[in-house]
Amino acid sequence: MAEYEYDLVVVGAGPGGYVSAIRASQLGLKTAVIEKEAPGGVCLNWGCIPSKALIHQAEMMHSLADLEKIGVSADLSGLDYAKVHEKSRAAATKLSKGVQSLLKKNKIDYIEGTATFSGPHEVSVDGGKTVTGRNILIATGSRPREIPAFPFDHKKVMSSRDMLSLTTLPKSLLILGAGAIGMEFAYVMNAFGVDVTVVEMLDQILPLEDAEVVDVVAKAFKRYGITTKTGTTAKSLSTKGKGVKLTVADASGKEEDLSADVLLVAVGRAPNTEEIGLETVGVRTERGFIEVGDYYQTGVESIYAIGDVTSSPLLAHVASKEGEIAVERMAGHSPEPRIEADLIPSAVYCEPQVGSFGLNERTAKERGVAYETAVFPYRGAGKSVAVEKSEGIVKILYAPDTHEILGGHAVGANATEIIHEILLAKRAELLPEDIATMIHAHPTLSEAVMESARVAEGWAIHI
């Protein structure tokens, strides 16, 4: 009889967990996955996928204005947001079933229930059945972060998950937090006619993105009629009466009351590391995040942790890649340790989209890194004009002496897709010259990437 039932037990079936399990199975490890909700985790069921389905519907609403320009009018009197919601749920359900099929195809045992550590090689499921593994991988993800002063009541004060559950629309919405989640919901709700105000404590919306890129988004949101208040702190909240009243203060301390039907609190996410028995086995955490080494191994030799439960960027694709690295290490391979932070792409799916990686001007200055910038406007790429998507830029940060690519940024149509050409060049240690001299199909939006590289080399054609 084997010492353990499995070579690997994965706790959580989100994009970190299920990808890890499949990769482990490919490498010959007998694997089980334990999940308390649906396959695909929060990302697939209550995050990445349903939110992008809503964004797609929002884009179609925005396109109605373009139809009016050619004499086509649409009757919106029959708009039923419940049907929009149904489409988002259908996408999530279809993909969740797809994950379940992938696990089955790869001969991975799927166990429903909540796992709690009962030893360094074992977990109990719902306090009953014990499952043992030579290694255990924690991939339990995260949840919307709750602020004590603005607790969720799931009716007037909502989390992102609550917003994805809406079948009827509020007339007005306040959003606390102008990160990717807040901005995406602002875009969606505005497209369906909701009066939206976004409040951000820092001095720009999308605080992690390049300021020149953010300026393009800010102008678009202003044109949509979305109000954004940056450098503004939320002081207190009242939920008496029909809606909510949020008291805020600007940088000078001047206070203002903002009212709406609903408040969405989108100020980050908290790791799901409580009540899974980490203290039982001696796995250490810092502010709730699990401490891990180069291959995502905790202080307990048999236990690994990936994704949102660690201090790495809380992104689905990061969790997936970390899981691949961890299980390849378990299987005796020699993967590159950790993910290099400057090679992680970031994506924001409002319109215009934002895609980025590496250094921006602010972070370059903070690190004391010398840089030059090469910026090319979307309007210089013929296709952007042809499809009426000329709003945007592609921007490359590069070293003045060697021309090494330091960071890439794009804002505009399909920015989340085209950013990967610059990222691939960075990872392959190519230079802007290599992009500049590579033939690109015409007309394509990716020509803006080529031209931005030509700006860096001093010979852009279409600017």
Image (spheres, rainbow, N blue to C red):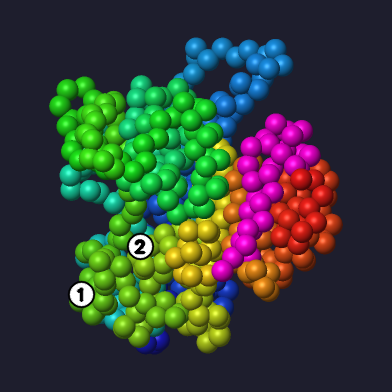
Determine which quarter of the picture holds residue 230: top left
- For image coordinates 31% across by 61% down, the residue present is 271
Q: How dense is the environment of label 1, judged by Cα within 10 Å: few (below 14), some, or many (20 and up)?
A: few
- For image coordinates 40% across by 30% down, the residue present is 227
Q: Where residue 401 sits: x, y (%)?
A: 67, 73
Question: Does residue 383 lie above or below 41 as drawn?
Answer: above
Instruction: Please indicate whether residue 444 sits to the left or right of residue 95 in the image.
Output: right
Element type where label 2 sits in the image: loop
Question: From which residue to which does the magenta span run?
Answer: 370-398
- For image coordinates 60% across by 14% down, the residue present is 74
* Residue type (three-letter) at the residue carrying disc 1: Glu
Closer to the N terminus: mark 2 or mark 1? 2
- For image coordinates 81% across by 43% down, the residue present is 443
Question: Does residue 300 lie above or below 210 as drawn?
Answer: below
91 within the magenta span: no
Q: Where residue 418 sits: x, y (%)?
A: 67, 52
Q: Where residue 2 sits: x, y (%)?
A: 40, 86
What residue is pinned by disc 2? 140
Asked if residue 47 shows in the view, the reply is no
Element type where label 1 sits in the image: helix
Q: Looking at the picture, tell me which residue is in the foreground, 100 or 284.
A: 284
Instruction: Please indicate whether residue 392 sits to the left or right of residue 205 in the image.
Output: right
* Quadrant showing the N terminus: bottom left
Asked if residue 221 shows in the view, the reply is yes
What residue is pinned by disc 1? 279
